[in-house]
Image (cartoon, helix red, strand yellow):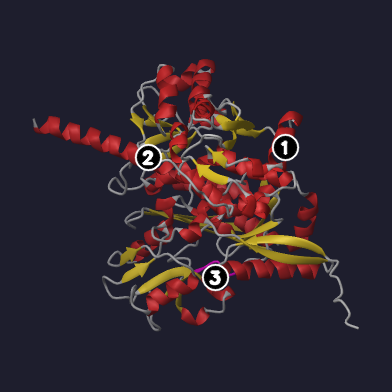
Amino acid sequence: MTQSPPTDSRRVIRIGTRKSPLALWQSRHVAALIEAAWPDVRCELHHVVTQGDMRIDRPLPEIGGKGLFTAELEEQLRQGQIDLAVHSLKDLPVEDAPGLTVGAIPAREDVRDVLIAPQGMTLATLPAGAVVGTSSLRRQAQILAARPDLVVKPIRGNVGTRLRKVAEGEYNAAVMAAAGLMRLGLTDSIAEWLDEDVMLPAPGQGALGIQCRADDPAILELLAPLDDAAARLTAQCERQLLWALGGGCSAPIGAAAYWDAETETLRLAVRVATVDGRHVFAVDVSTTGQDIASVVAQAVDQLLADGTQRALVRPADSGPLAGKRVVVTRAADQARELGDLLAAAGAQPIFLPLIRIEPIIDQAAEQTAVADALADLAQFDWLVFTSTNAVDIFLRQCHQLGRPLSATIDNLPRIAAVGPATRDALIKHGLPVDAMPDEYVGAAIPDALGDLKGMSILLPRSARGGAALPKRLVALGARVVDLPIYTTISTQPSAKAQQGLAGGVDAITFASGSAVQAWLEAVAVNPALGRDAEGAAIVCIGPSTAQVAQEAGLRVDVAAPEHTLAGMVDALAAYYEEIGNQQESRERA
């Protein structure tokens, strides 16, 4: 008689990970640490494909920054689909994502950068004009500071891909983090270990950040034995410095903190350079004890006194929005993408969150409505999404109600998305998109759905959504279940956020009509906001938002032809280019 295999009764912890060899190594390493600390726990890896993995044709700062490697993992954490996500800490924004926290930072690997080149070559001995690959502005700035005669070009791909590009001669050399090569056993590829006086690493380099839900005490307890006090201290010191200087993925800031336990001294070395390497600002400060605030304040004060702001602003020829101060009014947890796109175009984003997105599943009537719709999804011919918020919140609610759409994918209605961002949000959750209008506005959705006579449509969306779309769908013969699943709430900007406007504002961006209304409410309460932004260009993501602004009496200068965040940035760049052309014509006349 054949016996059944014994049942594994250990508690299962789901770890979200990207599929690259390095990401898998890091996640398996964390899984081993957890299982060693907790013998009654078993870890499972759940693979997630991020936008950063898919978009490898352009440098990170041009396509939205490091958040492209984390957003999908963070959303699965919020939805409860995974318990942990493992990241290279330098890829995580300094501020915790809403609802999430870094539960542990394990012992740190070597923080240095290294040169990948034919053996025997060093940064000093590379021939003039040699092409060095890196997509990091920090590395570019420090390479050119040491060797202005070299050519720096972007390089993307995983560790193996970048090594291959150097080996095949596409690049003469590349600069990479030592930690990744050490973890993958590829240190034989290293031609030179770059010392601190040549190349300071990125804040957090060499450290892993284990991200989890902030309100999950059981997981936080599970991670406690993995947290390394020295790694957390030094990484937090470097990341606090980054935050204090206002830096992110696109800022050329190098920093390395060191803790000497014997002398109880915390040292912080910082180097900021212009991206062309011509101007370098460096400080080296220390303090007794673990006073991060003190050592960071010393460093920032010295850097600002030396004029380091010049290195934190892109050169005038480095982007179509160079030097422009542009206000981002999106919700705090959604502002990062637009801010990174603006920074990539050379602008200085000023974050002034005026709204927050509030799910309404906690209201009994709405929860019942969602549950009723999910109980008989087969009754619907179409499931229509008009925003990324609707996608993320609806799928989260489905999961909370025990009916994840991914589990019933073969029986789903056809799915329509209002535009590329909403389509991408659905795809990242593994859902197909059957229709998308040519014009990315809600009013155009019916034109993409074909004959609607007798069709049944589920429309999960904002409680503040207008009546135009459901009315048109009904007029075309459809039965519509209009399902409010979230609302947008206006918020007053903090005093700190308002201070960002004090230096003058060139443009204000609005990605929704709700943001326009929130701006008007904020100005009514605090007229100084309006005075600080007087004369600023009003930029709207599309005609619907522009209509709200115009009806409120605002002058709309830019309404993006492509109704996406990237389209809004491109339209603003075109607006300033046209102003420049007109001014040049007047001067010639």
Q: Secondary structure at mark 1?
A: helix
CA separation, marks 2 and 1? 36 Å
Considering the image in quadrants, where does the C terminus appear?
A: top left
Residue 372 got which mark?
1
Q: Quadrant of residue 509?
A: top left
Please indicate whether residue 555 sits to the left or right of residue 369 in the image: left
Between 469 and 244, the one nearer to me in the picture: 469
Visible in this render: residue 290?
A: no
* Residue most extreme to the left: 589
Percent x, y for residue 21?
56, 71
Tell me which segment is drawn in magenta: 109-113
Q: Secondary structure at mark 3?
A: helix
Residue 180 got which mark?
3
Please indicate whether residue 388 sits to the left or right of residue 338 in the image: right
Query: Which residue is rendered at x = 42% and y = 38% of the image?
Result: 440
Q: Secondary structure at mark 2?
A: loop
Question: Which tag, 2 or 3, sits closer to the chain's start?
Answer: 3
Residue 111: in magenta span: yes
Percent x, y for residue 463?
61, 28
**Callout in the foreground (1, 3):** 1
Q: Amino acid at mark 3?
A: Gly
Badge 2 crowding class, 10 Å Cα cut-off, few under 14, some 14 to 19, many 20 or more, is many
CA separation, marks 2 and 3? 39 Å
